[in-house]
Image (cartoon, grey):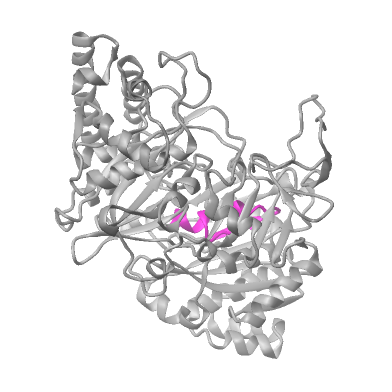
Amino acid sequence: MLELKKGADILATVGEVTTISDAKSVFEQNLDSINQQKLAKITNEDALIKVANAISMCRPSSVFINTGSPDDVQWIREHSLRKGEEEKLAKEGHTIHFDLPQDQARLVNQTFYIINEDEKMSSLAKSLLRDDALAYIKEFMPGIMADKVMMVGFYSRGPVGAPAAIPAIEISSSTYVLHSAELLYRNCYADFDSEVLRAGLFYTNVHAEGDNTPEDVPNARILMDRSWQTTFSTFCTYAGNTLLLKKGNHRFSVDYATYYKLGQQLSEHMFITGMTGPNGRKTFFAGAAPSGCGKTTTAMVGTDFIGDDLAQMWIADDGTLRAINPEKGIFGIVEDVNREGDPYLMDCLRGDGTEVIWSNVLIDDNRVPHWVGNGENAPERGINFQGEWFKGKTDADGKPVPMSHKNSRCTLLASAIANHATEIAEDPAGAPIKVITYSGRDADTMPPVWIAKSMNEGVAIGASIVSQATATEVGATGVRRQPWANAPFIPGSLADYMEAQFTLFNSTNLSDAGRPVMAGLNYFLTHANRGSSGDGLLGEKKDVRVWLGWLELYAHGDVEAIETPIGMLPKYEDLKTLFGAINKEYPKELYDMQFALYIDKIVSRIDLQTEAYSEEKGVPQTLFDVYKKQKEELLQLKDKFGAIVAIGNLC
């Protein structure tokens, strides 16, 4: 069990502010009269003491309270340009931010949970004992904002009033971070006190970029204090490391749902989107996929897009599973974003009227951004995060230097996207989730889509995700297990998190109609070992419309499926009809290759997962029962049909 407020509060220990009287004294000494008046609207004493401790520790030259008003947000934009963290681009409202070459993604080897002695942790998590974290913060954070402006914002991770929304404070000396926060999160300055009262807690985030030099990056740390729900980030600016409301606070929300909302809530690394079915029917999906595995693209395929990254889920009083997006914007990878696969997003990126912060793309001589895979003519030269770039440039090893980093990003309001369901996205009641999908990067094992035959098998699909490491994580390599695509963000025991999954999806509070369809997706299947001489993907990026469309029909009983040991598979004629709707031929030969069961590969995957989870203490026996049953049935099929079972043998 995670115990909150256990051990020394590091922020208070270093800041040495313990009373509201002391906090007010800090404000009088460090805030001008205008910002004192702004802060006076916040009355929660715990929050005020947190802010005062951050000021006392970081010692900024001044403090700016961001109320979210148009004037305050404009001040942040202009200060970012003055400071040089952003530069204007050709389009009105577009700016470019460059991170250091060493700071282009999540610094996984420099990211730690601050823990107490004997605390149960995920075997996939990196941790730091409280005393060691305190020693680091004492060494590097006092005075780290000298000669800089500290900016303080009050936000909500979700629509104000939603049952699973949690308020948070973002404190940073980086204008890029605060500017991004205004696009990605709901400023709840006016509702902060009431939201803390409703939720019963808030998160605190302190970020300081320091001098922002390459020499500082080895000292960078992203530290997350589970007990005090406070994050510290230093010597970096990449948003995945610094916009702590995002993945930092997501980790706290995973903890909170696992240990304090068992069977009631989940905090997931999932998109939320809606599909329009027959007669205008709206069906909402939530889907997990590791970073860099097509989650944003999948989300935007929906007719009613809500979010591309995170989901807070709960069982509503009516027995349905509901979800909100804790964000109101997207921080999306732009590599391979193009007209064919992402028309709505491209309208925002290349059209007028959308505010966009670009990061780490190429800027040409006309101040226009370019990126790899955009489907456009590439410029001959420009400026990127490494400096001057020209076509044919190579690195020290003679390898070609791409014009943009693989983890280049765009940050913009989700409501700017034409298919965004803004009304539902901002509704505290959340979207009713009818289908849940789990995806990874699987080149040769699982079919493009399959449906769990039970809630327990659905949980097992999520627990079994594997993925190739991507450019979103510095220092990560190879094929790795990615349980629920949430593994990097699960602080506690994987067994506890898994128990929370089994408990919620089997809850008697979920009505029969409210219990979601749970499915696996794999649109990274390749020709390799599939009886084909072709290269690359065994399908196309746009095929995801068909896989989601079939799931939408199945969820409402409009199509039947083929029962197999791994789950329910689609029938050819149903898919052919759906491919026809996107004006694409779908040969029977392709279907046969995609949906054949490669028994040895699937069994090897099951053995991999069984062995890995056997090393985790306390993993529910239910998972092993699912694996055992599937393996036995697969081997029975192998005895009957051989190592490769044609889908036609199962009809």
Q: Is residue 23 left or right of residue 192?
A: right
Residue 34, image x, y percentages? 68, 89
Q: In this image, 582 relative to 262: left or right?
A: right
Image vertical order of residue 80 relative to residue 534, above or below: below
Residue segment shown in magenta: 231-252
Judge by depth and name the residue closer to the eye, 248 or 484. 484
593 up-or-down from 11: above or below: above
Question: Nearest the camera: 84 or 533?
Answer: 533
On the image, which quarter does residue 234 sit in? bottom right
Q: Judge by depth and name the residue closer to the eye, 206 or 323.
A: 323
Give me the residue at 75% from left, 72% from top: 79
Residue 563 against residue 203 in the figure, above or below? above
- Percent position (x, y) of residue 483? 39, 38
Residue depicted at 48% across the width and 62% down the height: 327
Image coords of residue 381 (percent x, y): 83, 42
The residue sitting at 18% across, 23% down in the picture is 651
- Is residue 410 something one can see in this rendering? yes
Quick check: can you spot residue 502?
A: no
Residue 397 in picture, x, y percent from top left: 79, 24
In this picture, residue 333 sits left or right of residue 364: left
